[in-house]
Structures are given as structure tokens and as C-alpha cells.
Amino acid sequence: MAPPKLLRPCCMVWLVVFATTFYLSAQTTSYQSIFQELQRYDPLIITLETDLSAIQDEPDSIAHWHPGILFVMQADTIAHRYNVGVKARGNMRRKYCEFPPLKLRFNPETPGDTLKDSDDLKLVYACNENGESKDLVIREALMYRLYNQLTDQSFRIKTAQVSVKNTGKRQRTTERPAFFIESTDEVAERLNMIPYNPRVVSSRSIDSAAYDRMAIFQFMIGNTDWSLRSKHNIKMFKPEEGLPVAIPYDFDYAGAVDASYAVPHERVPIKNVRERYYLGRCRNTDVMQQNLVEFRLKKAAVVSQCDTMPELSKNDSRAVRQYLESFFELINYPNQVQKNMVDICEGQKN
């Protein structure tokens, strides 16, 4: 029997290249961020153990990472265990919260497992024990879902039921509704963009369609707690080609959420967040009407989100739905659009 033929050197080189490429491709496609992993659990029930006392006692100007453990639970079984860093975040919420809002940093769990920066996640949860605080979290989570219906250029969320076990000097365990917010880095990767933080930004220097959509959405939910100029509650992303895109977040001051502590921004002449005030750039009547076509077409998808969140009470669902319906009623009348969205705006009309 003839001996088997050996591969030529050139063939060996191509084989190695192919195998290496296949391996790297498999490694890339098999990677899942923590946010993606959490999507697998429905409902998502978690227990977070950390020294909440130390986090609460820190001055607002100082926020350190504290060690913690996060357990994903299925019934009475631990489905997954993560080592995390826990840090207080936010300014306004910390002024009225019994428990400060948190940011979690998920650490590598196995040798050679390098998690991306996308695994720093904000955790929004009921920061007081009262019922309003718990309802508020779900209503704010709904605002993210509404914007998801309008565009993929938005932050995704994952709702959860979280038990926070304080291992510090004021030991106690509290249960409350919560949601994780997709990280800036993961949004950028999903949209094939990069996070962008220019020193100066204006509505003329960014994608106008995305900007107008965002401004109309903020008007729809009654939110004046945002500013493009100061990048307040807005993150910027830049594609490889084209203009940067502005994506909003933090909607607890929106009229549709209707938090008892929410007040309109001091620069706007309204007395209650339930009143709408348009903060977008001035557009002429034709441009504004064209921008509203998308909202009219997606009305059913947007409003129906009020019925897709089992955590939302019937009363809250009805209240948010009615608030949204009032927006769609307004944009049916050209004179109301002219009065509320064309004549009231930021800058010169174009």
C-alpha cells in the first residue's frame, strides 16, 4: 500500500489560516454580553448582595466601586452567579432616594475571559419603599419600550424583579421592580457606530431625521428634562459615514411617567410636567408634518406597548395610554401642530 501523501507546504499554510480564521470567527460570534445573557430569563429574578450601607454613606461627589454578588434565580435555584462591582450613580435621584440608583460592573469569572466595557450596566430600581416608587420604575421602563418601537437607535432595557441584600451595618433585604439599561458601548456595537462625545454639539451638526424623531418623542411623552446643547440625558453616537446620532435616556421626569417629584425644566414656561412643551429645533410646517408621518404610522405599535408589560398595573396602563392618545389626537389637527410644535421651538425655522 502506498504511503499517504503529505500536504504541500503552501497547502499547510492555507489550512492554518483557514482554521485560525474559523476559530476567531467562532469566538466572535459566540460572545454574548451580560445584557444579552440576561435576556434569556423571563421573568428575570435576581438577588444582589452588597454593602449598601457603605454606598449610601458616601458623599455625592465620591462614588467608589464596592464588591458584590449577583445571583440570577430560577425558582429556588441559582441559575447563574456573577461577581460584580457596585457603584452609586445619578445626582437628582440620590436627593430623594432611600436607596441610591446603582451601576453594576460585571467582572471576568474564568481565566482568559475578558468581558467588554459593554458589561457595565445601569440598574434602575424602586429607590423607596412606597408603592408610587415601585410603579414609577415600570412606567419609566415603558418609555424606553415606546422609543424602541419608533427606532432601533435607542437604548434597550430588561425588566427584572430584584432583591437587594444589604450586607453592611444596616442589614436588611428588600424586594423591588427594576430594569437594566443597555450600555453605551453595546448600543454603539449594535448600531455599528462609536460612542461620540464632542465638546460642542448643535442640532445642525447631527443627523436631522434622528434628532427630529427624538424631539417629537420627548414632546409625545411630555419630557423637558433633556438638552442637546449640554448633552443632558442624551448620548451621542457616530457612524463610520454620515452624521452623529443623538439617543435619549432617563425619562422619569416625563409627564407620561408622572412622578410626584418631577417638575418642568426651569427654562420652559409650563407649571406641570403633564403639559407638553416642544424643545426641538424649529421646522417649517411642511417639514414638521412630514416628520409626524412616522408617528401616525406607528401609533398602534406605540400605544399597544401599554398592554405588553405585565408589571404595569391596569390603572397605570390606562393612564399612560390616555396620555399618548392625547398626543396623537393633537397631531391630527394642523392648527394644533402649528400652535404647539411649529410656533414654539428652538432657533430659526428651516
Image (cartoon, rainbow, N blue to C red):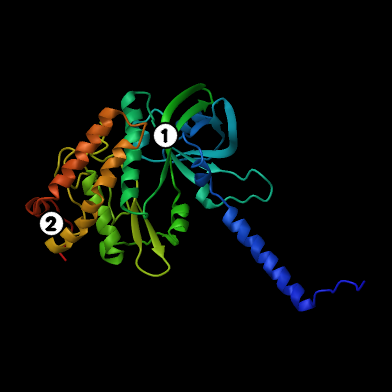
Residue assigned mark 2: 342
Left or right of 213 on screen, residue 173: right
Does residue 174 show up? Answer: yes
- Distance Cα–Cα, label 1 vs label 2: 37 Å
| Quadrant in which residue 253 is drawn | top left
The residue located at (65%, 63%) in the rendering is 22
Outermost right residue: 1
Identify which residue is drawn at 39% across, 30% down: 127
Q: Where, quadrant-wise, is the C terminus in this rendering?
A: bottom left
- The mark total stands at 2
Q: Nearer the viewer, residue 155 or 310?
A: 310
Sequence-earlier tag: 1 or 2: 1
Q: Quadrant of the N terminus?
A: bottom right
Query: In the figure, is residue 297 to the left or right of 165?
Result: left
- Badge 1 is on which residue? 178
Amino acid at dot 1: Ala
Residue 176 spot, x, y in % from top left: 42, 28
